[in-house]
Amino acid sequence: MQASNEISTDQSEPSDPAGEVTFRKNVLRARWMIILAAILWSTNGFFAKAPWFDGWPGFVLAFWRALFACAILLPMVRRPQWSLRLIPVTLIFAAMNYTYLTVMERYEASNAIWLQYTAPVWIITLGVVFLKEKTTWADWVMVFFQMIGVLIILVPQFQDDTLWGLTLKILVGFTYALVVLSLRWMRDFEAAWIVGINHVMTCLVFLPFVVHVGIYPAEVIQWLALVAFGMLQMGLPYWLFAKSVKHVPGHEATGIVILEPILVPVWVYIAWGHLASYESPSLSTIVGAAFILSGLIIRFLSERNSARLSESTG
């Protein structure tokens, strides 16, 4: 998912005709880049549910994805900086990778992605309680819709799942929220450095466990898939998003990225729907996702209307 909220934007539209044309071209190009980033992010289910990785624990997939993401992210770093804050930030990122990919690997793919999109609930709650941030009516409407969505997804699974499994599902959104908040905390650092070092720490955290279980890619198709998983599904989208949000307002970028959870089950069905192991989204997941998506759309439309109002009165 996207994690470049700390990048500043410059949307001041020039007054001269030539500059205006360039400005609009940059905005259009940025929108297409965000769409491409969302499409690439949405392929996570294709890789996590691939038969080439049957029996691979989530932490093994997290290690290899992070390793190849480093290969494309670290060359973009220009200003590496050290801070003690990097320790909790990178550990939080590793925890997010573990919870997300473990849920993706164990359960129906759309479960993980929709539960991750409940992160705004935690961000708003933690922001109000600890950071004393201000909220709007749309924020709390979104929280209400998303809490209903999560309950609809999880309640039917209470009897069929373990306590640890249910905890992991809740932690998917919580750990992603902590990642977003930590990136805000580190916004004075270069985005490529923060994202790159996060993936380095993920590799270091999971390396001992990978060595312990002794699961390594043994076939060419596994190597190719892992390279694509890290570079194309994780590393490249981060770069595209970081480049594009310089020309597109954050609320608009967030609205476009909603494409990701919508496309995840589509790619899984197209690629692996013919397999006996394929698990289609349950009715509870579909209904719960509709509530979560509704909450996101309400907040997005509210932010867009507020932005338009400020532009017209500015």
Image (cartoon, rainbow, N blue to C red):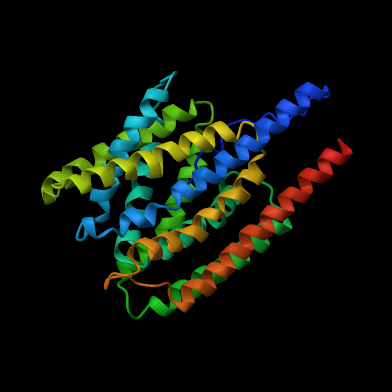
**Residue drawn at the location 35% of the way across and 72% of the way down:** 279
User: Which picture quadrant has residue 56?
Assistant: bottom left
Left or right of 292: which side holds 300? Answer: right
**177 relative to 168, above or below:** above
Near-viewer residue (148 or 48): 48
Residue pushed farthest top? 79
Q: In the visual, does 259 lie left or right of 55?
A: right
Judge from the rendering whether residue 125 lies leftward or rightward of residue 106; answer left or right. Answer: right
* Whether residue 162 is situated above or below residue 110 in the rendered picture: below
- In the image, residue 85 sits, relative to residue 139, either above or below, namely above
Q: Is residue 265 above or below residue 35?
A: below
Q: Residue 260 or 228: which is nearer the viewer?
A: 228
Label count reads 0
Q: Position of residue 290 (x, y in %)?
A: 57, 69
Image check: 190 left or right of 62? right
Which residue appears at 39% of the width and 30% of the height? 73
Q: Residue 212: percent from the left, percent from the top?
A: 11, 48
The C terminus lies in quadrant: top right
Name the residue at the right extreme: 313
Q: Is residue 17 visible?
A: yes
Residue occupying image coordinates x 45% and y 54%: 174
Query: Foreground residue, 159 or 85?
Result: 159
